[in-house]
Amino acid sequence: MKLKEWKERVATAEFEKKLRPLYAEKAHRNAARYGALLDLYEKTFSSDDEITLFSAPGRTEIGGNHTDHERGCVLAASVDLDTIAAVSLTKDNKISILSEGYPMCTIDLEDMSVREEEINTTASLIRGVAARFASLGCKVGGFRAVVTSTVLPGSGLSSSAAFEVLIGNIINHLFFQDKADAVKIAQIGQYAENYYFGKPSGLMDQMASSVGNLITIDFEDPENPVVKKLKIDFEKTGLKLCIINCWASHADLTGEYAAVPIEEQKVAGYFGKQVLREVPKVDFMNAIPQLRKEFGDRAVLRCIHFYGDNDRVPQQVEALEKGETSRFLELVKESGRSSWMYLQNIVPLGANEHQEMAVALALCDELLQGKGAFRVHGGGFAGTCQAFVPKDMIDAFTERMDQLLGAGSCHVLNIRQIGGTVVG
C-alpha cells in the first residue's frame, strides 16, 4: 500500500480495531503513533513508496532471573510497549534505518562479516540479523525504514531484543516468505546480539518479544526450547503489572552482566559441563567447599540463586494456572530476595553513592506495605524493577512513585497477546 493510502487508513476506526490485540485499551493512542511514523517516513525518504508496517514488543521477565543463559526455565511476557517500523524495498543492496532521535544507520549487504568497529552499535544488530538469515538460504535485499519506539533504551524491557525481532520480521516477510517461525526469529536475534553486538545474552529476551503473550520457556535444549503459552487472563488476578524506572542506564555495564554467566559457567566447568543446568544440584552442594576456594564466594552464591530461581518458575506457572495468586506473589518475593542476596545484580561493583536500583526496590517495599510483590527486573544493576500492585492501590502507588523518583518513573503495562508481527 502506498504511503498516502496508509496515512488515510491509520486514521480509521477499522485500523484502530486491528490494533486492539496489540495494545488493548491503548489502541487509539497507538494508531496516532503509526500516523506520526508515516509522517517521519515521508519527511525522511519519500511520499510515493510502497509501505509495510511492522511491530515488535518489549518484554517483561516474570520468573527466572538470569536463568536462561544456564539453559534454565523462565516465565515471561510481551507487553504493550513496542518498536514499530515503516518499511519499503530498495534496489541498492543496502539497509538504511532511521530510528527516531538517532542518525541514519546504513549497512552494505556486500559485507555481512563481523566488524570490530560496530560492536555495541545498532549497525551490528542489523548486519548480524541479515547475515544469519543469509546463512539460512535467504536472499536478503535492500530496504529502507523509519523506526520509533516506546521501549526506552536501558529500561530493562529489552529494547535491543525488540529491535532485533523487528528486523527479523522485516527480513522474514520481505525476503524469506515468512518461513522462519517466531522461535527461529528469536534465535536469529540472539545470534546477532552474541556474535555481532558482542553481548553474551541468553535467549529469553528475544523469545518473549518474538513469541508474545504470557509464556514459559525451558531452555534445556537451546536449539529446541520448549515454549508454552499460558491460557491465563492476568487481569483476573486483581493485580496490575508495573515497571519502575530507577533512572540508571545500562550503558557501560556489559561487564557486570557478562560476569554472571562467566562465573556460573566456570563452576559448571569444574564438573566438566558447559552450564549449570547440566550439573545436579546435589553435586554442586557437596562441592561447595572446593568451589569457594577455586572460584570465590560470589560465584557460589550466584549458582545458589540459579538453582533456586530455576525451581521457582514451574511453581509460579502452577500457581497462576490454579488461580493461587497469593502463592504466585510469594514466589515473586522469593525471587527478588534471591536476586539481591545471592545473584547480587542490584548494585554495580564498587558503587556507593549511586544505588538507584536499590532505592527503587526499597520504595516498592515501603509503598506496598506487604501487599502485592516486587523484584529486580531483567538483567539488573540498572534499568527497572517490577511490581505487582493490587488494583485498588495502583493510582496511589503510581502517583507516589512518580513523586519520589521523578515524573514518568512508574509504567502500568498490559500483557500483549501477539509478539513480533506484520501490522499490514
Image (spheres, rainbow, N blue to C red):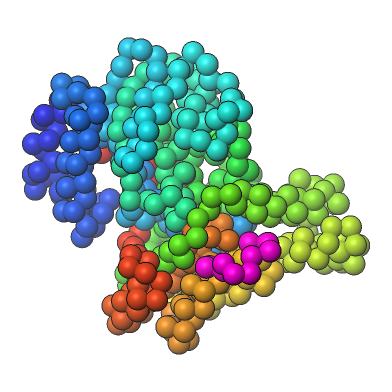
Q: Is residue 130 above or below residue 152?
A: above
Count of numbered tags:
0
Residue 253: % across, % down = 60, 52
Quarter of the picture holding the C terminus: top left
User: x%, y% of residue 297?
Assistant: 81, 66
Whether residue 359 can be seen here? yes
Res 171 visible: no
Q: Which residue shows up at 84% across the image and 57% down it?
A: 295
Closer to us: 16 or 89: 89
Residue 236 falls within the magenta-colored stretch: no
Asked if residue 290 lies left or right of residue 144, the reply is right
Q: Which residue is drawn at 21% across and 46% down?
A: 33
**Corner quadrant of residue 47:** top left
> Which secondary structure dominates the residues rendered in magenta?
loop
Q: In which quarter of the image is residue 348?
A: bottom right
Q: Going 26% across and 33% down the picture, which residue do you hit?
A: 86
Closer to the camera in the image, 147 or 267: 147
* Residue range corresponding to the magenta coloring: 348-357
Residue at point 37% right, 18% down?
A: 142
* Position in image of residue 122 (x %, y %): 47, 35
Indicate whether 197 appears above or below 387.
above
Asked whether 356 falls inside the magenta stretch, the response is yes
Task: Report the front residue among 129 and 417.
Answer: 129
Position of 110 relative to 26 (above/below): above
Q: Position of residue 423 (x, y in %)?
A: 25, 38
Q: Nearer the viewer, residue 170 or 320?
A: 170
